Amino acid sequence: MIGARAAVTLLTVVPIRGPERLDRTVAGRAMVAAPAVGFALGFVCALAVVAMRIMTKPPTGGAQTLLPAVVGVALLAGLTRGLHLDGLADVADAVGVRGGRERVLAVMRESTIGAFGAVTVLFVVLVQVSALSTAIAAHRGTVSVLVAAMTSRLAATWSCVEGVPAARPDGLGALVAGTVRRRDAVLATAGVFAVAALAGRFDFHGGDNGRAVRAVVAAAVALGAAFLLRRRLVRRFGGVTGDTLGATIEITTMVSLVTMAMTIPTPALRLVGLD
């Protein structure tokens, strides 16, 4: 429970009292609990998407998709204080400069956002909104939000697994880097995949086995992208920081939503017996 409370205070704006002492042990438990926080965030945002679809349905039929998608993505950012988007901007600015490790870390620390960071945030959010809008039009918007929120926080869990160094001796990265046991990360992954499958199977918009497979595939693809991104960022910065965790969460969210929005070819569905 201490780890869960710490995860909520670190990853959301929910006004609950955090643990009195936040050391590496508690931080590790918080990062293991991060996917559960992602589930709660995704559930709330999914409800908002459904509500906006109901309230903005035109009288002539059809369904509004863009506005619910904007509300869903905006709410997810608001519930996390926009910290992950800020981290994405800082990381993009640091990656975009030339120089050694100390130079890029100094750029990442700057409070201002440069052109590269602003453009990166703009296009990542645009892709997220567009992908969610497409998924909503295909009647899988709610499960898409849920899977994206869970998987992106699971990516943060894996970014703090044993053996991953911190880029700096201070800050959030130093507190959480290397604190998660691989066994716990594997168990968290199994839990996310199981919930994703259940969400796809029993989604009230028309859950079926095909959506269950799609949800698990989206989680796996997004997690794979997160692994590649973590490897690239650790190589560039020498380890993880709070900003790299935020960037990983946003990119993983984007990849998950895009995967959920994509059309699976009929031959592929027949291959797995879902057509």
Image (tube, rainbow, N blue to C red):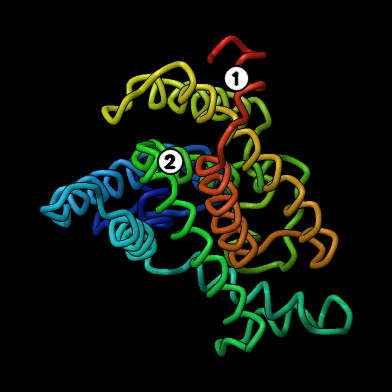
Q: Nearer the viewer, residue 3 or 139?
A: 139
- At 56% from the left edge and 48% from the top edge, which residue is drawn? 258
- At 73% from the left edge and 53% from the top edge, which residue is drawn? 230
Q: Nearer the viewer, residue 183 or 155?
A: 155
Q: Could you tell me how far apart the alpha carbons at marks 1 and 2 are, in whole angstroms? A: 19 Å
Q: Secondary structure at mark 2?
A: helix
Q: Secondary structure at mark 1?
A: helix
- To which quarter of the image does residue 200 belong? top left
Mark number for residue 144?
2
Residue placed farthest to the top in the image? 273
Neighbour tally class for label 1: few under 14, some 14-19, many 20 plus, Cα within 10 Å = few
| Residue 254 as seen in the image, left or right of residue 39 | right
The amino acid type found where label 2 is placed reads Ser
The amino acid type found where label 1 is placed reads Leu
- At 34% from the left edge and 60% from the top edge, which residue is drawn? 66
Quarter of the image with the N terminus in it = top left
Residue hosting label 1: 269
